[in-house]
Every structure is written in C-alpha cells, then in structure tokens.
Image: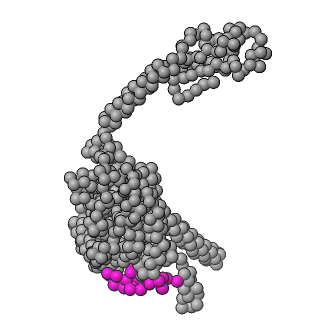
Amino acid sequence: KQWYQRRVRGLEFVKTLDATEISQTTYSILDLGFALQCATLVLMMQGGFMMIEAGSISNRLKLRSIVLKNFGDNILAGTIYMAIGYGISYGDGGSFIGGSGFALQGFPMCTENDNGTTICDSKQYALLIYRLTFAISTGTILSGAVAERMRLPLYYISSCFVSCWMYPVVCRWIWYKSGWASIHNSHEKRLFGTGVLDYAGSGVVHMTGALPALILLPLLGPRKHRFRGDSKEERLPGQNNYYTTIGAMILWMCWYGFVCGSTASSAHDLGYRRSYQGSVVAKIAVNTTVAAAAASLVTVLLGLYYEKKTDCSNANNGIIAGLVGITGSCATVDTEFAVVIGFVSAFVYFSASKCMIKVKLDDVVDAVPIHLCCGLWGLIAPAIFSRREYVELAFNHYTNSSEVPCGILYSCDGLGSKLLAANLTYALALVAWVATMSCLLFIPLHFLKLLRKEMPEEEEIEVNTESYSEELPDLVLPTIAEEDNIITNQNAEESDQESTTTDERSDTDQVPTYSTSEISQVQSVYPDVIDLQRVQPELHVIPPSPGNSDQLRSDDDSTESDDNTGSDEAELRLNSSHSVS
C-alpha cells in the first residue's frame, strides 16, 4: 500500500512537470505571436502617415516623393537600426549608451550550453522586429512636418539620424534595464528612487521625432503663399480630407499594436510574471480608445467655437493628439482619467497649432503640436494620474510594494512628487540631447544651402495654375450662415437665368401652344407619349404637316399611318436641354 501510494504521488509529480513544461511552451509561443502581430500593426502605421501627408500637401507632384520617403524609412532606417541602433539601445554597456550587439552579433537563434544541449529561443528576434518598428515610426514623424520643401536625399539622412542615433540613446535611458533613468533598474539606482514612467513612448518616440522638425521648420521656411504679411493663414489649395481621414483611421487602428505590444515587450525582456498581462492589455485598449475619442470631440468643438466651422482636420488631428497623450500612461491610469488626459491633449494641440501659425512656422500636418506638445503632456500625465496598483501590475518586478510609485493625486509616501521630478528631468535631458544633435546636423546644411531647393516643376505650377497666381485670393472658408446665403443667392441667380432663357426662346422660336385636346390627339396616335404635360408643363407641340392632318384627327387606317411614320411624327420641344421624341 505504501509502495502504491508513493508510485501514485510520483506519477502525479511527473504529470505536473509535463503540464508545466507544455504550458510554458504554449505561453511562449502565444506571447511571441502577440509581439509579432503588434509589430505588424506598428509597421502599418507608415501607411497612415503617408495618407495624412498625401492629403495635406498642396502640390500634387510631390506625391511621389511622399511615397518614396515612407518606403525609404522602412528600408534605410530599418537596415541601419538593425546594424547600429539596436546595439546602442539594448546592447551591453553603460547606462547612457550600449556598446555591443551591433549587426545582430550576440543574438543567435540557437545556443549550446555546457553539457552540449542546443537551446533555441526566438524571443530576441521578436523583440528586434517590434523595437525596429518603433525606431522607424520615430523618424517618420519628421516627414509630414517638412513636406514639399526638403530635398529627398537630405531627408533620408535626417530620418536615419533620428531613428538610428537620437532615438536609440533616449530609448536606452528609460527602457533598458540598467538605463540611468529606467524604472526597471534596481531600487537604489532609480532616478529619484522611482525612475521615469513612460509606458509606451509619449516622450521616447513622439518628442524625439518631433523636436528635430521644430528646429528644421525655421531653417526651411514656409511654403509659398502660406502666410501673408499680417500673419494671416492662407489655406493652400489641394488638400484632400478623404486621404487625411483614412490616414487617421489607419493610425488609430494600428495604435493598439503600438501601446498593447509594449506589454509583451516588457514581459519577454525582463522576465516578468505574465499571469495578469491579459488584463493589462485590455485596460490599455480601453484607455486608448476613450482618450482618442474625447480629444477628437473637444478639438472639433474648439474649432467650431473659435473658427466658426467644423473641419475634418480638427477631428483627425484631435484623434492623434489624444493617442499621443495617453501613450505614456495607458496602462497605469483609471479610465475616467484617460478621458481627462484626452481632453487636455485637445487643448494642448489646438493652442499649440495656433501658436505655430502666429509665429509663421509652416507645419504641414501639425506634427510639432501633436507629437512634441502632446508628447510632453503624455510624459507629465503618468506622474499625476497613475495608480500604484496599476503600476505594480503593469511592470510587475517590484519586490516591495512600498517602492511602487504613483501619481501626485494619490498618497504613496511622497513618491508622486519624486516621479514627477524624474519625468521632468528626463524631458529636459531628452530636449537637450535631441536639440543639440539636430543643430549639429541641420545648421551646417542650412548655411551650405543644401536643405531646401525649389524644384523646376514647382515653379512651373506656380506660374501656370490659378491656385498659385501672383495674388492668391482669400481662401478662408465661410461660416455656415454665409454658406446658406451663398447657396440661396446662387439658386436665385440660376432661376433668373432659366426664366430669361425661357423668355428668349419663346420670343425667338414663336412656337404656338396647343390645348389639351390637341395634345391628347397626338397621344392617341403615339401611345408612348404619356403625361408629358404633367412631367414638363412648358410643353409645346408643333402641329403636323397639312398633308397628314387627317391622320391625327381620325383613328382610321392604322396601316397607312404605319407606312407613313416618318411624315406623321409630331415634334415635341421642351424649354430645357432635354428632348423627347
């Protein structure tokens, strides 16, 4: 009996081991598949950026360069990041910059341990492709802001410089486990004892991508006819709201891969427990949705109040502003605070956009107000609204609950103010780094006159089209009341023209008008002509020729009328552009 009991316990233990190994393998496969699917969504964001930029430009000959720029980001920035950028971000080294793992050295698919057993693990490759898409998206933010003015080779250089040098450094600071501002660092090494909380990259991605654009815009100058001497905005022709709306919807859909995939990235890289990651992903999706919707609604209302009109661009840019604002705190705030973050993002974007116009900075897609200003707000928001329980659940690597930070709205032993100080310190360091590198690159190119060049086809369009005449007409859209008055006046003018045309034709043609009985006689010979006078009251009937008048007044000899159809046809004339026979 004892032997049997020991055997049963042993079999149960073996089954437990097998089940654990199978479940761990299944979890690993599912996690890798989720990370790769999120990476695919982030890569599809390039299509959204391309559609928004294509719908915002005024020169249609620039569409080809827009397509080339977005594909070039994938090709050039992707290749260089795998060769250099990934090692700078996640290679072994110091807290400021990595010094190993270049050209994917040190990331083999399969390794052999001491006893000769081969172990294959593809998690590094899944993380590589996911982080690669973040780097590409960072460089693409520059594209929309400087559209129609920057030389294509110089744009490639700038985009690769942002994606493969500026971004990897600021990324390592807070997302690598030993970065100097990382929340993943050990407790004694965290900045202000908390580290920086930027869950999916409001500062890391969006501020880094938009700050070089802010430095480039004064150097490039505005497009022709964009502003007048009194700083009044000129709405350049050629914008397509259908393209921009489709692009905004693509970005909104792909943004779920951007924010939700950060959960899989953290769990794989740092070995966190994955038991509650599904709940975190669901919360991220809800917060992202409500923040984007709230920001879009408020932006449309602001446009209606200040501009006296509803505009698709306000709705589209409001969506993206809300998405950028919630990115840094999507996993650590309550849903009601996600709505508040979206509301504030709308005000931040709208006011920043008006300030850009006031100082005559021509940002084609409002990349600076959206990504830089709302990105800064998205970096501050976690230090205000984050709840301690959600922070512990999202990162799940704290050994002591007293170490977990929270926002200043909650009481967590003074860690809220320290978290705010850490996030602001990181924002200042990011601005200093990116601005310095941008100035070192762009200012020499500006003095060498290599940044901007007016293309010959651009000059030809400005001469030969009305949209680019010497004196561009005022293209400010009218209000709703003005549009109603315009439509009413146009309808009155059209009715006057129609009545004048009718009178002229009546005086010129002098076509007699026949009574209803005579029209019915025509209809008796030609049954297909039914209720013409009801359809068109201004119906005139030309009487038949005298030789065939007897056939119209009698119903005899239908055979003869069939033989002489050509001579018996009555001509019907309408006082319009249509004719009936």
Residues in magenta, as a range: 88-108
Does the image show residue 359?
Answer: yes
Q: Where is residue 444 in the image (x, y as percent from the top left)?
A: 28, 77
Q: In which quarter of the image is the N terminus?
A: bottom right
Please name whichever residue, 152 or 128, is drawn nearer the observer in this view of the structure. 152
Q: Position of residue 476 (x, y in %)?
A: 30, 46
Please name whichever residue, 330 or 465, is drawn nearer the observer in this view of the structure. 465
Does the image show residue 244?
Answer: no
Q: Which residue lies furthest to the right in this view?
A: 559
Please name whichever residue, 322 or 517, is drawn nearer the observer in this view of the structure. 517
Residue 581, quarter of picture: top right
Which residue: 27% across, 60% down? 361
Count the marks: how many?
Answer: 0
Which residue: 54% across, 86% down? 111
> Looking at the magenta stretch, what is its main secondary structure?
loop
Which residue: 33% across, 84% down? 94
Q: With 374 as the anchor, is 559 left or right in this view?
A: right
Which residue: 74% across, 19% down? 564
Q: With 139 as the anchor, is 557 left or right in this view?
A: right
For residue 92: magenta? yes
Q: With 455 as the anchor, is 580 left or right in this view?
A: right
